[in-house]
Image (cartoon, grey):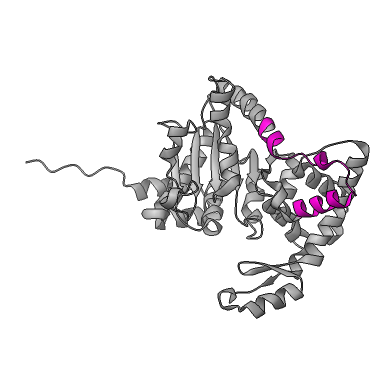
Amino acid sequence: MKKAKRQTKRPEDLNAALAAKKGPVSQFIAHNYRHFNAAALLDAAKGYEAHLAAGGKMLVTLAGAMSTAELGITLAEMIRQDKVHAIVCTGANLEEDIFNLVAHDYYERVPHYRHLTAGDEQALLDRHMNRVTDTCIPEGEAMRRIEAAVAEEWVAADQSGQRFFPHEFMYKILRSGKLTKFYQIDPKNSWMLAACEKNLPIVVPGWEDATLGNMYAGRCVTGEIKNVHTVRTGIEYMVWLAEWYTKTSKLLRNGEGSIGFFQIGGGIAGDFPICVVPMLHQDLGRTNVPLWGYFAQISDSTTSYGSYSGAVPNEKITWGKLGEKTPKFIVESDATIVAPLIFSWVLGK
């Protein structure tokens, strides 16, 4: 009986060959990340790269507190190198990158956060330090500073009868230069600055529950802002996204590319935009619009109890979001660890 031939190229050999022209981070990943979630990380990274190489565009979604985790260190470079073509994020991620930009040196890290008592938490509140896991955001230097800058834009738009999306107001204050003197990190590590320079499309569903959204609502209550709709939100973002997806996919279809979906975390940042495709098909009858051409998610959620954020990608087939042959990846791990590594691979670091 003949022995079965060993495959000529083992997976680790193929990955090593791919990483050979990349930097040390990518070579480390290729050599060490061979199984389980580590292998899924590398598969998602290679899929991302292949999607772009085929002429595709990539939409990235940001849930959680990725900006406070300083994901901008790698995400900003992804934007500058045209590896990201649109972003959907929570209002928290939209504002917290700018909070960090202007107040980084006032942030405090609390590595022992698991052992804080209720009294310890009250003491942080008394000092106006708002905690996100192990990181405290200083209210005065971060939130109030940005509030003062953007409120001028809200009021000016309200008085002139103009309306803008939340990210457009952020772009306005960044472009005005009024915050430049407060910068406390290297500007190249701010993903919002990189997005602003590219005029990158950003969609911010549920902006109202963010800190600045609360502050805006307060000004509507006091009457300082007369028209509550001065800041455009929700449904208008979905209408905009529907047109962007339709036009972009049409342009790409001529060049054989497609639009990919790279989801960091779960929640509204991912749920909102992925629904645009079934809406286009089922509600608008645009059946010639293609499905998402790539899907990857980094999540530590599970499928138990009907969790959508933890659902395996195949469930999305039944909702008309992904196709049977769409490349699908899920990395069940910590996005603050995984996303920078995937981005580093795509950037060739």
In the rendered structure, which segment of residues is drawn in magenta? 212-239
Q: Is residue 159 above or below residue 115?
A: above
Q: Nearer the viewer, residue 32 or 159?
A: 159
Instruction: Give coordinates of residue 281: x percent, y percent.
Output: 54, 24
Q: Is residue 242 above or below residue 342?
A: above
Left or right of 262: which side holds 132? Answer: right
Left or right of 131: which side holds 171? Answer: right
Q: Which residue is situated farthest in the left direction here?
A: 1
Image point 88% across, 46% down: which residue?
225
Q: Is residue 342 above or below residue 129?
A: above
Image point 31% across, 44% down: which residue?
9
Image point 46% across, 37% down: which residue?
316
Instruction: Give coordinates of residue 285: x percent, y percent.
Output: 56, 19
Report the number of discs.
0
In the picture, the quarter occupied by the N terminus is: top left
Q: Is residue 129 in view from this perspective?
A: yes
Q: Is residue 258 in view from this perspective?
A: no
Q: Nearer the viewer, residue 196 or 315?
A: 315
Examine the structure image and report whether residue 233 is included in the region drawn in magenta.
yes
Instruction: Give coordinates of residue 238: x percent, y percent.
Output: 66, 34
Left or right of 104: which side holds 317? Answer: left
Magenta span main SS:
helix
Res 202 quadrant in image: top right
Instruction: Give coordinates of residue 71: x percent, y percent.
Output: 62, 55
Examine the structure image and report whether residue 210 is included in the region drawn in magenta.
no
Res 189 quadrant in image: bottom right
